[in-house]
Amino acid sequence: MANLKKSFQKATEEVKSLDERPSDETMLKLYALYKQATAGDVSGARPGLFDLVGRAKYDAWAEEKGKTEEQAMQAYIDLVESLK
């Protein structure tokens, strides 16, 4: 678990220095996996219809519901590696 957390932390730093900015869809996936890994399942009310960004983030995070912290960390690491 300690190695996974170190790899996850490294991946969160590496994503900031990618050669090319990922697509919006990929950025949402990264956000959702990060939130799932650090905060667990999504909670709270879904943002309103006029909060498009908040709603997209909420929905992306909700798609990761049920993944364990370790599963979300590994998926995040794998996604960052695929973007290099």
Image (cartoon, rainbow, N blue to C red):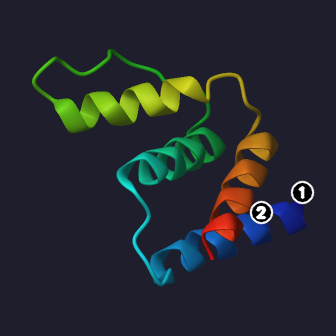
Viewport quadrant of the C terminus:
bottom right
Name the residue: 51% across, 41% down: 32
- In this orientation, which residue lies closer to the viewer: 81 or 72? 81
Is 73 on the left-hand or right-hand side of 22?
Answer: right
Residue 59 point in image, percent of width and height: 41, 25
**Residue 29, relative to residue 51: is it above or below?**
below
Q: Which residue does the image show at 26% across and 34% down from the upper left?
A: 54
Residue 42 rendering spot, x and y as whole percentages: 50, 25
Label 1: state its secondary structure: loop
Query: Is residue 53 positioned above or below 15 on the image?
Result: above
Question: What amino acid is labelled 2 in the image?
Answer: Lys
For label 2, the residue is 5
Q: Nearer the viewer, residue 48 or 24?
A: 24
Quarter holding the N terminus is bottom right
Judged left or right of residue 73, residue 30 is left
State left or right for residue 54 relative to residue 20. left
Q: Residues within 10 Å of mark 1 (few under 14, many from 20)?
A: few
Q: Secondary structure at mark 2?
A: helix
Q: Position of residue 69 (x, y in %)?
A: 74, 41
Q: Does the CB distance between marks 2 and 1 fall below 8 Å?
A: yes
Q: Quadrant of residue 14?
A: bottom right
The three-letter code of the residue at mark 1 reads Met
User: Horizontal placement of 82 versus 1: left or right?
Assistant: left
Quadrant of the image occupied by residue 53: top left
Label placed on residue 1: 1
Q: Position of residue 78 (x, y in %)?
A: 74, 59
